[in-house]
Image (spheres, coloured by chain):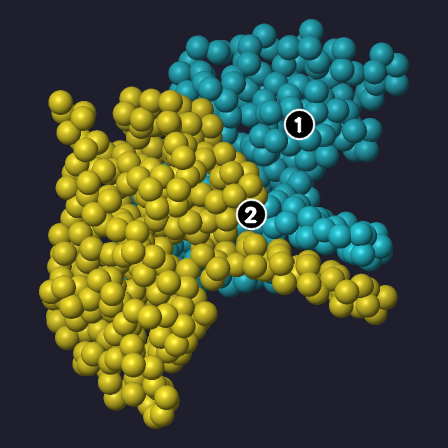
Chain colours: A cyan, B yellow
Amino acid sequence: MRIAVDAMGGDHAPHEIVAGALESARQVSFEILLVGDSAQIEPLLPKRGRPDNLAIHHASQVITMDDAPVMAIRRKRDSSLVVAAMLVKEGKADALVSMGNTGAVGVTAKLLWGGLPYVDRPAIATVLPTYTGRCVLLDSGATVDCSPRQLLDFALMGQIYAAQVLEIPNPRVGLLNIGEEATKGNSVTKEAYQLLQSQLKEEFIGNVEGKTFYEGVADVVVCDGFVGNIFLKTSEGVAEMVLKVVKEELTRNAFNKLPLALLKPAFGRIKRRLDYREWGGAPLLGVDGVCIIGHGRSDRYAVRQAIAVAAQAVANRLNPTLRHALTLLHQEKEG
Amino acid sequence: MRIAVDAMGGDHAPHEIVAGALESARQVSFEILLVGDSAQIEPLLPKRGRPDNLAIHHASQVITMDDAPVMAIRRKRDSSLVVAAMLVKEGKADALVSMGNTGAVGVTAKLLWGGLPYVDRPAIATVLPTYTGRCVLLDSGATVDCSPRQLLDFALMGQIYAAQVLEIPNPRVGLLNIGEEATKGNSVTKEAYQLLQSQLKEEFIGNVEGKTFYEGVADVVVCDGFVGNIFLKTSEGVAEMVLKVVKEELTRNAFNKLPLALLKPAFGRIKRRLDYREWGGAPLLGVDGVCIIGHGRSDRYAVRQAIAVAAQAVANRLNPTLRHALTLLHQEKEG
């Protein structure tokens, strides 16, 4: 197995990407290919004791956060992202990992690899911690304007992913919305509610709100990529602010400083339970290949997690599983 | 001054609404009118020692969360919400307070009172705590599908509200979006970015993400009512989950129980800094009258806060101020 890592994508690229890939390579047996500007990557690797399973594949250009996705792919054919995706297309790598421009990663994978059968647009499936367990949110940023029909595609892919990869039996699907009642929502979610209900029957639990999401009422929650991305970043922002306020208030006077020291192990556990980095990268579902999209802010630890997620997706046969399950599902409906 | 309170709207109506109004009436000098089913409200009030400034105005019907807004208003003309809004229209009350169906409250106020000049659709302006201060988010649920032009209206109303009511000098406006770059977003936010930049010039700070929002980079942040409502409820859900996890981890073993007791005052302060109830109800801007929309989950304390917000808005001449400032602003642009 060989994983192609876009070394130039992300807020802390190439430094943290290279460091994460290096740490991974030392722990695993599969191959890791760092795709990007070798003049920048080479100096970041040790001269001696470099692991055998880590190599550089040169690409001269970089797609930045400012680049409009479709334009970037056309104009920057020798960018780390496009070159890494081509390696997967040509069978020279088994998966792509990128922390770069989410829109550009989605468009590149879709254009170069093509889509899965019966799926109109791809979706990023992010696994989030809830109070009682975890929940798959999709789309968290690949397809920003969605039709109700596309939301149904996301629901089906989310169910297959939850059941067959995360091993959650009979996943319950919810629709992210602004009220629990069927009459609530914007024009797209109102129509999507009816469609999900008629197609998924009792597997559809109805609308899920930001609050009930974190209570863990559903295993899979669908929304368009714009709303999903807002949801994700808002969650991160609030969690960080709350923890900052908690720490500030606990250290407000000298009297409290001693107990805080005693409580340090608890704070370690809290951080682990809530930290997005523990959850690694998220798979882009609906494209014909394994693509793991990491957080733009990823540090070396998050990069290592994303590479592990990619390796697991390849080992678990994520793509053939989705392809097979989607084909069966639609044949049943038509037959 | 007289405030009309929709006694039948909200998850805990009429019980908590009546209790909150009663507590308010005992503390203030203005009049409070409880609008709703007198057979249900009467038994909730004390037989003796009822404040002189608290009265009941009977209305036989109730608009529920399941009701589709426009239909509900047409069919339920004797509902507490419609009757309360009529009292304001007829000059028998100065403001409307409701914790009920947000969509129905927005549509009722707009249809019965009309809109403000140059404003296409109304928006709920919610003041949220940030790490460094506070920020006005609008729309948080009145207008779920928005055009770029409507987002500009929200920005202008938000600026006037922030400057003249909250007394924030030169409010900085941001657009809630999924990336900081101008190229990011869905079809509406991409166009809105250009419009806000050309109209607000340097007062527009660009895109704001869920994370930077809570760092306090802007004083006013605009988005459509669907996204705003998701943002609000997600924030609430995450804050609750994080505090629950913090408490669980701090009480995980007996060793930590003593320090936790010592830290109780800090937890009181944390709750106050993050609690939505402290911020009371939110004004519906863009309708020709004062309408304060409270959280559906409001308890008596939140109801008291919402009534206080309404009284303050009337005292501060919120509506004439907005009308005057909007007229000036558009005349300047045309002249």
How many numbered marks are there? 2
Chain assignment, label 2: A
Identity of the amino acid at label 2? Val
Residue A238 badge: 2
Q: Residue at x 15, y 41 (%)?
A: B117
User: Residue B188 falls in which quadrant of the image?
Assistant: top left
Q: Nearer the viewer, mark 2 or mark 1?
A: 2
Identity of the amino acid at label 1? Ile
Nearest to the observer: residue B81 or residue B50: B50
First along the sequence among labels 2 and 1: 1
Nearest to the observer: residue A38 or residue A264: A264
Q: Position of residue B14 (x, y in %)?
A: 34, 78
- Work out whether A165 lies above or below B197: below
- Determine the residue located farthest toward the bottom in the rendered image: B47
Q: Which residue is mark 1?
A: A3
Quarter in which the N terminus of chain A is drawn = top right
Q: Position of residue A246 (x, y in %)?
A: 67, 52
Query: In the figure, is residue A145 to the left or right of B135?
Result: left
Q: Residue at x 30, y 39 (%)?
A: B160
Q: Position of residue B222 (x, y in %)?
A: 36, 39
Mark 1 surroundings within 10 Å by alpha-carbon count, few (fewer than 14), some (14 through 19), many (20 or more): many
Q: Residue at x 62, y 57 (%)?
A: B270
Residue A111 badge: none
Chain assignment, label 1: A
